[in-house]
Amino acid sequence: MLNSGNLFRLAIAEEKPLQIVGTINAISALIAKKAGFRAIYLSGAGVANASFGVPDLGITTLNDVLQDARRITGACDLPLLVDADTGFGGAFNIARMIREMINANVAGVHIEDQVSMKRCGHRPGKLLVKTEEMVDRIKAAVDARTEADFVIMARTDALASEGMEATVERCQRYIEAGADMIFFEGVEQLKQYETLSKHCDVPILANITEFGVTPLFTKQELYKAGVNMVLYPLSAFRAMNKTALHIYDAIRKDGTQRIVLDDMQTRQELYDLIHYFSYESKLDELFAKGEIHE
């Protein structure tokens, strides 16, 4: 039986490029599966914003992320890539993080080369650690891996502050240290993906997040530029938030939800998604009506 890491690697090999969508919780993961995606993602910003209502500035902890990851993998069998920020500490913290992610049935993680007080990859003022320190992070992660197919992805934010040549050099060092894949952040031109792909022999991920510095390139454009994975980390989350505000405003203003029913998932649609009736059938099978004891 294939584990999550195997499934993720297989999806990359078979879908070119592999589209990966952000899922902030278990129900989002099930919706993504229903839509036909083969891999999903848990964003650090998603955990911070959705679960805690705080900015993505290194405020959340490993346990915070693990809790959301476990809920997703417990409900959905799609391979889950998880944002591990800067690793949540030194070498032993990184090793613990890897072991816990594997135990949570996560397919892989990405670790970035920012300082521990990190910032959003599409905001100014990012500070990077020296290449040697990031190499140490990767080595610690690789050493702790107990499943060979668990994916260790290195994310680099170097383009904004160090330029393309230095970014390529960093990525090559990260690959030498054992990184299976590269997350190339803050890209502004397709030719930058092309340049990196020519110098790196591992799969490359493009982060196509909305309202950031990276244009909304199509998957066809990215594939021609050498990209193997296309990530949409918070697209559905942004839409959920806007729709929720629309619904709340309507209820507050009109005193009823009648005019916004068409914007809602129906009860039947939800029940179908979570297989509600199979649970009821199991209760009917196990217990005679009225004989359930609490």
Image (cartoon, rainbow, N blue to C red):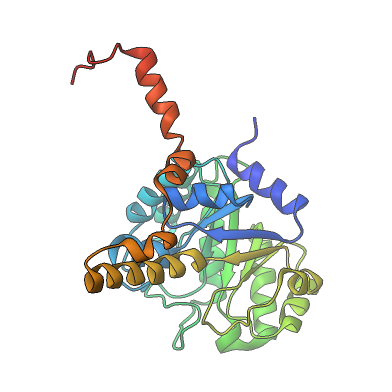
- Of residue 103 and residue 77, the one placed in the foreground of this image is 77
> Is 38 drawn above or below residue 164 in the view shown?
above
Compare residues 141 and 118 and report the one nearer the observer.
Answer: 118
Residue 280 image point, x, y percent: 37, 25
Answer yes or no: is residue 89 visible: no
Q: Nearer the viewer, residue 85 or 264?
A: 264
Looking at the picture, how far across and down is residue 229, in whole percent?
A: 68, 62
Which quarter of the figure has residue 132? bottom right
Residue in the image at 39% along x and 14% along y: 285
Q: Residue at x 37, y 65 (%)?
A: 260
Residue 148, given in percent of the width and then of the height, sits at 63, 42
Left or right of residue 252: residue 87: right
Residue 287 picture location, percent across and down? 31, 13
Residue in the picture at 22% in, 70% down: 252
Quarter of image, res 2: top right
Work out whether 255 lies above or below 192.
above
